[in-house]
Image (cartoon, rainbow, N blue to C red):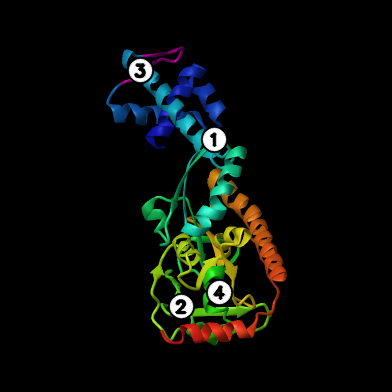
Amino acid sequence: MDTLENMRMFVRVVEAGSFTKAASQADVGTAQVSRSIADLEARLNTRLLHRTTRQMSLTEAGERYLHRCEQILSYIDLAEAEAAGATAMPSGRLRVHSTNGFGQHYLAPLIAQYYALYPDVAIDLVLAQRMPDIIEEGFDVSIVVARELPDSALVSQRIGAAFTILCASPHYVARCGPPLTLDDLNHHTCLHLQLPDIVPGEWIFETHERDAAATVFRHRHTTPLTVNVSEALAETIRAGMGIGPLPLSVALPSLRDGSLVRVLPQYRLRTNNVYALYASRHYLDAKIKTFVEFVREHAPRILEEQERELARFDAASGAGTDTSATAAGRERISGR
């Protein structure tokens, strides 16, 4: 029997007033209780109990040791209760990583709603494009947007899907004309969003057709701008610098106010998955479990609502585009 259990037995003997009663309470033999106290005294090299055939009493050292044992065991019981409670009641500090766009436009609003339900959880949100080492860097959860996940020992939960569309400013379209086909993009100024899973100078498109194969478009001309944050790219597109890819959540506010228009609405850039990653599914802390469940429940609804809103914009703007405007735009920019 280890020292901690011997300490518990020592306290039980004192409280029961005899070895026999303590043995009965612990559902063990009297000899085991006697051995436990003897092992403890041998370890301490101190007698803790005076015992005769008729009575038992504490030595002076035993009285001091009893007080310390009660304190120590009380702290241990409290620590165990708190640890066990962590799997039942969300509380404490939750460290969350998310990629920039998803974290700013989706996760931050959801965190406010989550906190309203679980005010005992304090959240540290870190936004970064790179995928961190969750364990090494001390994160509880990482929300990432990626086509696929690398092999790892982490638990992953798919939250939903997000995609990117091509946008330009109304001023740019009026000046250069709208592209009608992917090949038309080679006659336009194209701005690039540089992310870890994107090949520079390459866009992979999907159409709305369910079984259509993805189309890879490679630019013939060097881009005048590459940026790794979609909000910064949106600013340059609104300023009329060229055509660029924007996540739907970044594009929608500018589509609403008319400072951006969608180009090539029959295409979207390849869809990415949104994943929640965490270290283990065993004995999962309540704050991690409830947070992941909350995001999985609410994020898909927001993603779907935004996709429906985009469909309304596309319907309102019309599927067709004036080919003469495209031809005129090509003539204006052909001398680049």
Q: Which residue is mark 3?
A: 62
Q: Residue at x 65, y 56 (%)?
A: 302
Q: What is the secondary structure assignment of the residue under circle 3?
A: helix
Q: Which residue is mark 4?
A: 173
In 3D space, how far apart are the residues under numbered discs 3 and 2 (Cα atoms)? Answer: 85 Å
Q: How many marks?
A: 4
Q: Which residue is mark 1?
A: 120
Q: What is the secondary structure assignment of the residue under circle 4?
A: helix
In 3D space, how far apart are the residues under numbered discs 4 and 1 (Cα atoms)? Answer: 51 Å
Q: Is residue 302 above or below residue 316?
A: above
Q: What is the secondary structure assignment of the residue under circle 2?
A: loop
> Which residues fall within the magenta stretch?
47-58
Q: Which kind of residue does numbered mark 4 sit on?
A: Val
Q: What is the secondary structure assignment of the residue under circle 1?
A: loop
Report the front residue among 323 and 215: 323
Q: Which kind of residue does numbered mark 3 sit on?
A: Gly
| Label 1 packing within 10 angstroms: few (<14), some (14-19), many (20+) | some
Quarter-of-image position of residue 255: bottom right
Q: Residue furthest left?
A: 45
